[in-house]
Image (cartoon, rainbow, N blue to C red):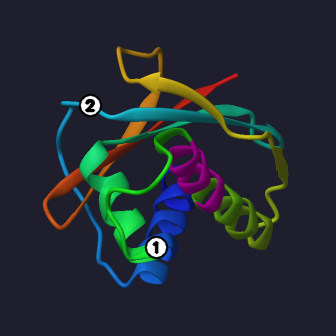
Amino acid sequence: MNGILYKACENFANTLGIEIKQCKSNEIKGYVSRISISGDKNYDIYLVVPKEKLELVSEIFFGDKDDYDLEDMTKEIANLIIGNSKVIAGEQNINFEISTPEFLGEYHGLDFDDFICLESRGIKFFILYKER
């Protein structure tokens, strides 16, 4: 899943006109949305995005870093990234359905198998996933 999720994050970053790179950190913080995938792969995927990243995306999308709904923005980013991962997986003959994003609030620890740390413009965000 790492390769598929990373490529989907790259695609998302490209639509924003920003670069991302993998980083090494386990200091996970931010707001969490969960999307479950079911089919050839079965995972709960958690996108953890700090407020600074939400502000950056809001500024790029809407031209205003202060006027956005935190819950909606967190879910929309998760939906865009995981939705794109479904397309990428399909190109590799891996098929799954995705659930509606669920906002879980601020990160206070989760049970997960693995994670990806990504960074852009000095801001780290995380994708955690747990096989079901």
The quarter of the picture where the C terminus appears is top right
Between 12 and 42, the one lying in front of the other is 12
46 is higher (above) or lower (below) than 106: below
Q: Position of residue 131 (x, y in %)?
A: 63, 27
Residue range in magenta is: 72-80
Q: Nearer the viewer, mark 1 or mark 2?
A: 1
Task: Tell me the element at label 1.
Answer: helix
Q: On the rendered structure, is 114 left or right of 41?
A: left
Q: On the rendered structure, is 35 left or right of 111?
A: right
Q: Is residue 33 magenta?
A: no
Q: CA distance from mark 1 to mark 2?
A: 27 Å
Residue 27, by quadrant, is top left
Q: Residue at x 84, y 55 (%)?
A: 95
Between 41 and 14, the one lying in front of the other is 14
Q: On the rendered structure, is 104 left or right of 48?
A: right
Residue count near mark 1 (Cα–Cα under 10 Å), binned few <14, some 14–19, many ≥20: few
Residue count near mark 2 (Cα–Cα under 10 Å), binned few <14, some 14–19, many ≥20: some
Q: Which residue in the structure is indicated by mark 2?
A: 28
> Magenta part mainly helix, strand or loop?
helix
Q: Position of residue 107 (x, y in %)?
A: 37, 23
Q: Position of residue 23 (x, y in %)?
A: 20, 53
Between 83 and 87, the one lying in front of the other is 83
Q: Residue at x 77, y 40 (%)?
A: 100
Mark drawn on residue 70:
none
Q: Residue at x 47, y 64 (%)?
A: 9
Q: Earlier in the sequence, mark 1 or mark 2?
A: 2
Q: Which residue in the structure is indicated by mark 1?
A: 62
Q: Is residue 77 magenta?
A: yes
